[in-house]
Every structure is written in C-alpha cells, then in structure tokens.
Image: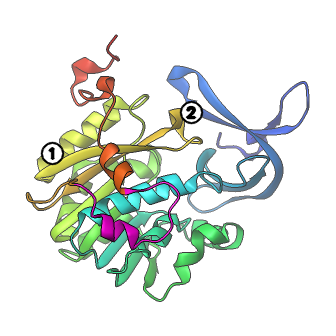
Amino acid sequence: MGDSEILLKPLQPDLNLWFEERLEIGFGSVLRVLVKETLLLKKSPFQQIAVLDTAKFGRMLVLDGIINVTEFDEFAYHEMIVHVPMICHPCPRKVLVIGGGDGGAVREALKHPEVREVHLCEIDREVVEVSKEYLPEISAGLDDHRVTVHYADGAEFVKRHPGYFDVILVDSTDPVGPGAVLFREEFFRNLHAALSDEGIVTTQCESFFFHREVIGTVLASFGKVFPVTEYYYCMVPTYPSGVIGFAFGCKSSSGGKGPADKSRVAALGPLKYYSSGIHEAAFVLPRFAEAFRTPESDEPRS
C-alpha cells in the first residue's frame, strides 16, 4: 500500500472510491472503507500521509497505507492507552508520549489534574502539522501550555532523560520498518531507566488474534525489565480484528493494575470508553489468549 496510485480504488459495481488496508497478508484479510473525498495525500521524509473523508467513520488519518486514527473510534484507543496506566500511577505529574503525532494521547493525558508536563516525541513533524489542520478535535491538546513537542527519534530521546517521567506511553506503529526498534528489549530497558521510581509504561502491542508471536516476544522482554508486567486490550473497529492490546510494565514491584480509584476516574470528566469497570475487565483475556506467551500455544484452543 505504499504507492499513492493504489491507495484508493473503485470496486464494482457501484464505482465508489474505497480505501483498502491489507490487515494481515498471511490471513488473507482486508478492510475496505468507503471514501467521500481525499483531503490530503503527500509524502513526508518518513512516510506517506493521507487524510480521507469517509462515508461513515469521519476523517481518517492513514500512514503508509495503514489506518492510524479515525474520528469515529479514536477515543477508544486513546482513552485506553492513557487512562489505564495513569490511574494505576499514584500521582502522574510528568508524562511522555512517544509517537502519537495525531495528539489523541496527549489530549487524554491532560485530563488528569495531577499532570504538570506532557512531552510528545514524534519523529515526523508533518504528522503533527497535518493533524492540527485536519483533525483539530484530536490534536487540540497540543497547544496546551503544559505540552512540549519534540521532533526526534523516541528510542534516542528516552536515553537523555533518566528517571524523569512518571508515565511513558508508546503510541507506536506496527513492528516493521523504523517502528521495529520500539519493540526491542534494548528500548524497553531505556524506558525503564527513563521512569521515576514508581513509573509505569504502556506500549501498543497488537492484536491477540493475529499477533501472538509478537505479543509473546514483547511480554517476555518486558518480564526481563519490569518487576510487574501485564497485558490488556480494548475494542477499536477500524484496527485489525477489532481488537488492539497494550503491554503494561511497572518499575516498582508494589505497582500493578489494581482496581481503579473511582474518585480519580470521576475527576477525568465525561469519557466515551474508559471507566473503572472497563479498567478491571481489560486485563481479563479470552481463554485462548491466556497462554499466548508460550510458542506452543500459537493456535487457539478448541
């Protein structure tokens, strides 16, 4: 999906334009979204960027042919990558978002009254600029006085801030190309070093339907680095299989998923997906996914 000529295609018989994302080549599955208008199609120094106005999902940001966010369901992903670790932390004052140039994770982090600083480290300046222009509701928090945007490689950025951040949110792409470094043990060790004593990190960690090998590798590496390691997930219709998960690591052995503090959840104001009940339920995995850390359990149980 790297060439702009094949980003949109007419499908018989109605000849409307459709965006097609190949979800998983090995599984032979695709996602097609009806498009009303192409608002932007360009190449940055790092990737192809497209903004499409869709028939049912609102505006959609596409990076290198892969759906990044849609206005329709972005709240589910952003609320869950942010609020789960931040409610688990006793007082998250300093937050780092790696990736996430659309600004959705920053927007959610700012809802926590304890927050004093949010640092966004995004390698591609044009993703931020495009999001500000075409996705203002998602990117609105980027102009907050507590936010500093750094255009840098996240893997290198964390090395320069030992012990500084209370919560780190890795809103990464898939583990291919430049994003592959964000799924390696060396990077996780650098995240650990960049956390304060009770620090927590959450990183995007794929779908347990399609990516159990990737998840198993990430969790095995997390287990070598963090004394407490968990995996949780949420539902996002425009992501592979409708499910996206997160690896969760605590620097302190006394930390962990715990029950959500309902008073702190209430202080966040109106939300669309996250709640104290969802917080606890998100860590409960389907039976077939309970043992995906081991290579032997690569196939679902019957």
Magenta-colored stretch includes residue 133? no
Position of 28 relative to 138 (above/below): above
Q: Which sits in the foreground, 135 or 275? A: 275
| Res 28 quadrant in image | top right
Indicate the amino acid at tag 1.
Gly
Magenta-colored stretch includes residue 269? yes
The dominant secondary structure in magenta is: loop
Furthest-right residue in view? 14
- In this picture, which residue range is highlighted in magenta? 259-275
- Residue, disc 2: 23
Q: Colour scheme used in the picture?
A: rainbow
- Residue 78: x %, y % from top left: 48, 58
Contact, mark 1 vs mark 2 (Cβ under 8 Å): no
As drawn, is 179 to the left or to the right of 51?
left
Q: In the rendered view of the protein, which quadrant contains the C terminus?
A: top left
Classify 10 Å Cα crowding around label 1: few (below 14), some (14-19), many (20 and above).
some
- Residue 126: x %, y % from top left: 61, 68
Indicate the amino acid at tag 2.
Leu
Q: In the rendered view of the protein, which quadrant contains the N terminus?
A: top right
- Residue, disc 1: 223
- Residue 143: x %, y % from top left: 55, 83
Q: Does the image show residue 181? A: no
Which residue is depicted at the point 32% across and 70% down?
Answer: 264
